[in-house]
Image (tube, rainbow, N blue to C red):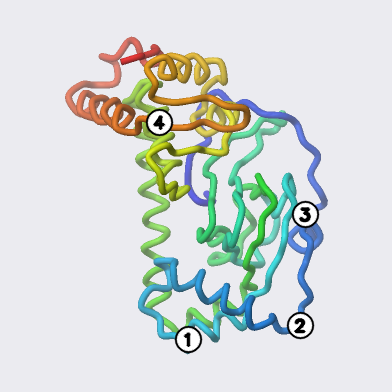
Amino acid sequence: MQNTGRTGRGWHGRRRVSAPAASRETTAMVSAPLNPAPSSVEESSLALLRRHTLFGGIGLDQLRRLCAYARTRKARRGTTIFAKGDPGTALFAVRAGIVKISAPSPDGREAVFNLLHADEIFGEIALLDGQSRTADAIAVTDCELMVINRRDFLAFVQDEPKVALRLIELLCARLRFASEHLEEVVFMGLPARLARTLLRLTEDGNAPTQDKRLAITQRDISQMMGTSRESINKQLRAWAKNGWVEMTRGSIVVTNPQALAAIAAASAKNARQSLPSQSDDRDGVESN
């Protein structure tokens, strides 16, 4: 599990050719020089760490020590940052851009677990247990990443028990997310699941306006939900007629999040009052 999600049902994706696993985390990215980072980069790393809940409550001197370990990496759009099965040698944080966490099937299809935006951390599972990566991390856009080697990070955590406790909280949050996602698949129909997915993505993206634009395709959403792109398109078109969403090339705009929240809330309430077998229209389309 990597930034937990689910493999789900109905995989859709393209076959792709991966780079050799041995050196992907260093060769798949454009690397900054390994000499000490300039002051402006250190300050950028410090600001990122202070914003993340994992490092809340940590003293400034300790954060500066951690920043001294950090290096900057740039990944072009489409770059595989690391792949499932690669050794877990580093912790990553997104400075800018969007990173997709996904897993391939043997026949080349793909399940998308999460889309990560600025200030989010990934790669912590393999970092902590020393095992191989459990999912792929791919740059959806041109990305700037902060990277901390496993050896340096573990040494820091041993000296800072607060960070260890926050790591436990982070992993618990990942597990809760996975459980909620599974519950959605079992108990909710497609309209409610899609509404919850769009709302979750708008919250993760920190969109500041009423109209929340998501740089995501319908294919990406179908891979996240484990259903067909056609089903997603049909539901989005129904909502677009109501003025709740707008569909543009390569993005979706949520224009009425309150309407989607009402759909999600109603479905959650019904799910608690009925067994899964009592629902016979799970993949039906709702327009209101």
| Mark 3 closeness class: few <14, some 14–19, many ≥20 residues within 10 Å | some
> Closer to the N terminus: mark 4 or mark 2?
2
Which residue is found at the position 61% from the left and 79% from the top? 42
Q: Please, what secondary structure does the residue beneath circle 2 have?
A: loop
Q: Which residue type carries mark 4? A: Thr
Mark 1 Cα within 10 Å, few/some/many (few <14, many 20+)? some
**First reached walking from the N terminus: tag 2 or tag 3:** 3
Q: Secondary structure at mark 4?
A: loop
Mark 3–mark 4 distance (CA, rounded to whole Å): 42 Å
User: What amino acid type should be assigned to the residue bearing mark 2?
Assistant: Asn
Q: CA distance from mark 1 to mark 3?
A: 33 Å
Q: Pointer 1: what residue?
A: 62
Q: Secondary structure at mark 1?
A: helix
Q: Name the image quarter holding the C terminus.
A: top left
- Disc 3 + disc 4, Cβ < 8 Å: no
Q: Position of residue 208 (x, y in %)?
A: 41, 48
**Rendering coords of residue 126 (x, y %):** 58, 60
How far apart marks 4 and 2 lie (CA) works out to 46 Å
Mark 4: give few (<14), some (14-19) or many (20+) Cα within 10 Å.
Answer: some
Pick whichever, 138 or 109, lies toward us.
138
Name the residue at the left extreme.
273
| SS class, disc 3 | helix
Horizontal side of 106 relative to 280 (left or right) equals: right
The numbered dot on residue 35 is 2
The disc placed on residue 21 is: 3
Q: Which residue is mark 4?
A: 255
Q: Position of residue 76 (x, y in %)?
A: 75, 52
Label 2 to label 1: alpha-carbon separation = 21 Å
